[in-house]
Amino acid sequence: ETRNAMLEEYTGIHCVYCPEGHAIAAQLHHDYPTQIFPIAIHQGSFANPSGGEPDFRTEFGDALAGQTGLTGYPSGTVNRHVFTAPNTALGRSGWAPAAMEIIEMNSVVNVGAETSYNEATRELTVNVELYYTANSPEGSNFLNVAILQNEILGPQTGGGAGNNYEHNHMLRHLITGQWGEEITTTTEGTFVER
């Protein structure tokens, strides 16, 4: 199998160019719905709410952004891969070429996930399986499971919809914590269930 591309998009409700970034991310997902997956991470000064605005930030955003080297908004990373040393951050014009490069690469691990939700207890169960089809170039890998939410109405500078701008792919929580759960056996033939 080839890799999927995770586009972590750093954004905020007061960022005038972010709606353009949202449109690029949405189009990439539309064109490659089973290969490119955006995650909108509201973070930084443009994400600070004021005067009763909703707060779309999470406890994870600042640390995630801190490891990218971003210098402006919107910025994004694709699979946290370094395309231009030393940073992983890319401007919005670089997202599509980077995603295309990633989805052409072979993957050393196949990942499958299945979820179930119990409305009565409000409990979400996520079962993940990993199977290594080749040796990973790294001695340990990290499994990240994120909860995203779509169709959240709120303000967005430059969005042209007042307080009814539709925010999608918004990071709400990282179930596996800030940096994920460590996988320490990453050799061909390894099967992992979490």
Image: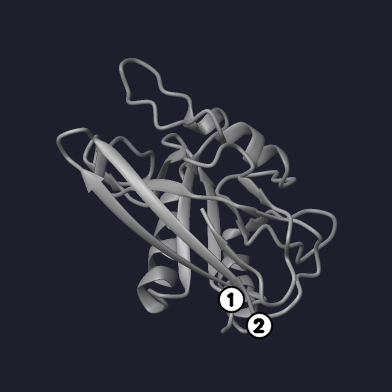
Whether residue 151 is visible here, answered yes or no, is no
Q: Which SS class for mark 2?
A: loop
Which residue is at 38% across, 44% downward?
158
Horizontal and vertical percent for residue 21?
A: 47, 56
Q: Residue furthest right?
A: 86
On the rendered structure, is 140 left or right of 74? right
Horizontal and vertical percent for residue 126?
A: 39, 51
Q: Quadrant of residue 91?
A: bottom right
The residue singled out by tag 1 in the image is 3
**Structural distance between the alpha carbons of marks 2 and 1:** 6 Å
Q: Residue furthest top?
A: 51
- The correct choice, above or below, for 37 with respect to 159 in the image is below
Horizontal and vertical percent for residue 47?
A: 48, 31
146 or 80, which lies in front?
146
Q: Are marks 2 and 1 in contact (CB under 8 Å)?
A: yes
Which residue is at 49% across, 50% downward?
145
Considering the image in quadrants, where does the N terminus appear?
Answer: bottom right
On the rendered structure, is 179 left or right of 45? right
Horizontal and vertical percent for residue 178?
A: 60, 37
- The correct choice, above or below, for 89 with respect to 50 in the image is below
Which residue is at 58% across, 79% downward?
103
On the rendered structure, is 130 left or right of 88? left
Q: Amino acid at mark 1?
A: Arg
Whether residue 57 is visible here, answered yes or no, is yes
Q: Residues within 10 Å of mark 2 (few under 14, many from 20)?
A: few
Q: Which SS class for mark 1?
A: loop
Which residue is at 56% across, 50% downward?
144
The residue singled out by tag 2 in the image is 106
9 or 127, which lies in front?
127
